[in-house]
Image (spheres, grey):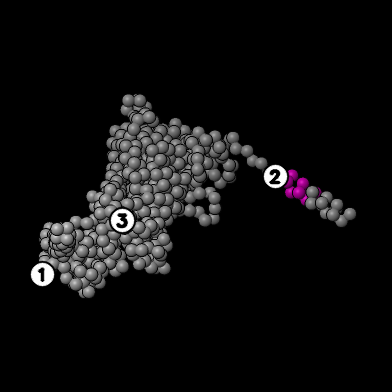
Amino acid sequence: MLRLETIICTFSVLSVAARADFKARNCSEVQEACIGKGFSFAHVPLQEIPGEHLRVCPQGSTCCTQEMEDTFGQQSKQDFENLTDEISHELRSTFVSRHTKFDEFFLELLENTERSLNEMFVRTYGKPYMQNSEVFENLFAELKRYYTGGNVNLEEMLNDFWSRLLERMFTLLNSQYVITEDYLECISKYTDQLKPFGDVPRKLKAQVTRAFIAARTFVQGLSVGREVAQRVSKVSSSPACIRALTKMLYCPFCQGMPAAKPCKNYCLNVVKGCLANQADLDPEWNLYIDALLLVAQRLEGPFNIESVMEPIDVKISEAIMNMQDNSAQVSYKVFQGCGQPKPAGMTRSTRGVPDVFNARFRPYSSEERPTIASRTSLDRLVADIKEKLKLSKKFWSNMPEAMCVEDRVTAGNASDEECWNGHTKGRYFPEVQKDGLTHQVNNPEVVVDITRPDTLIRQQIMALRVMTNKLKNAYNGNDIYFQDSSDEGSGSASGSGCTEDCPTEMDVAATEAPMVEADRSGPVDGSARLSAPSLALPTMLALLALALHWQWR
């Protein structure tokens, strides 16, 4: 009786094993999964077949034909590109949208400022302004040309603006004389000595150059980031990468386990091997983001172009009033330096000074101009972009982690024993590789040639390096397009020349005392003193003789 029970038990075990083996060799689930993913294969085996024809997946019993494996390879490449595009979409859209917003804001600010100045000056100065409005139109045209990337030296352009304005105003204020082009050229030589517009040109030049350098470089920086993100996101997968992706994503189909998901560490090694070059972008990308954030701080603070441009009409009007108030003194000095111009005939207007510019801008009340503490439109834009930029640091080295998550590729950490490890369901034991090309030399999943860096990625690294240098210069108020090689250390000819801590207007005013030098061919200032170093040469000769005397004793 006992023997009969043993035979029956043994038969039952063999029957269960046979049914399990039959179920394992059934490929119906693979068929359903392929249809669900949109594959239209000519033939999907109903049961497992010998897999000697396979080149990527395990060659034992399989549910895949050669056609299926080849199609899986093509689909793996497409899936990986789609995932990369999906993960980088937010980064790319951030740089595209923020670049557009900042660019539109700065251009609109320029247009609004020019329109406001024109309306105020027409209302305040009337015909004299309208007859000379091209001077101001040229100013804004050059500012716009600089901002949009033109080769404009801001300091020289602003100096030229004040020289042209001096010529026009001097002619208007001395309409009883014939002012020729040669005479105007003589006047322009002494603009710095005369200081007809007071301290306004110096202060405005410092403010405008720093603000425009920061604004232009910041927008250029966003443009470079946009281009780099768009180019690097378009991955070019190597054959070794495609093999590894196929093995990870679709070989479970061939093993009759279409629902199995890759183990996380397995996925990380595959993606780190495929994105080895992209990870090498990260160090330079992080430096670039840091530099952008520094310039963003300047835009919020002393280099805020909005706070510089909005009151520029008032500042220029203040300069005009300075010129008018001191017109007699300025004319006297010009006549001494350039000679007395010929009187005009009776047909020329002989209006007095007060009739030319007989109106002043009234001072703005605190309600009309925003206070320093108020948040401008630019402040809000900068605050928004700073948060986005901070989140984008380490983006490229974090891509494998972003890709190898449960809702995208992997089975998740909770299913380590049930995940696909490249061969079967079970735990994945190899260690996860570090980021970057050189660390993939021992990658167990992807064969990576570490001696051949990707040319496109190296180009983007160089582009980021150049832009980071520009941003650092802009943070210090310098424009490297006009670096003066003959005066190293003086900073840019188109920047403020300051280093880490730029001086305030009070600091500059305290260190730059105006001085008028006596010049027989130029304007004479009664306070100017001539000093002749008559004792310097004899004293030096006496000391030299004494030194030689002691040497030969």
**Viewer-nearest residue: 112 or 193:** 112
Give the amino acid at mark 3: Arg
Residue 123 included in the magenta stretch of the image: no
Q: Residues within 10 Å of mark 1 (few under 14, many from 20)?
A: few
Q: Earlier in the sequence, mark 2 or mark 3?
A: 3
Q: Which residue is mark 3?
A: 427
Q: CA distance from mark 2 to mark 3?
A: 91 Å
Region rendered in magenta? 534-542
**Viewer-nearest residue: 212 or 525:** 212
Q: Which residue is mark 1?
A: 42
Q: Outermost residue toward the right?
A: 553
Query: Which residue is drawn at the image coordinates 31% and 68% (left, top)?
Result: 240
User: Which numbered dot is residue 533?
Assistant: 2
Q: CA distance from mark 1 to mark 3?
A: 34 Å
The main secondary structure of the magenta stretch is helix
Q: Earlier in the sequence, mark 2 or mark 1?
A: 1
Give the amino acid at mark 1: Ala
Query: Which residue is drawn at the image coordinates 47% and 45% (left, top)?
Result: 476
Give the amino acid at mark 2: Pro
Residue 490 appears in view: yes
Question: Which label lies toward us, 2 or 1?
Answer: 1
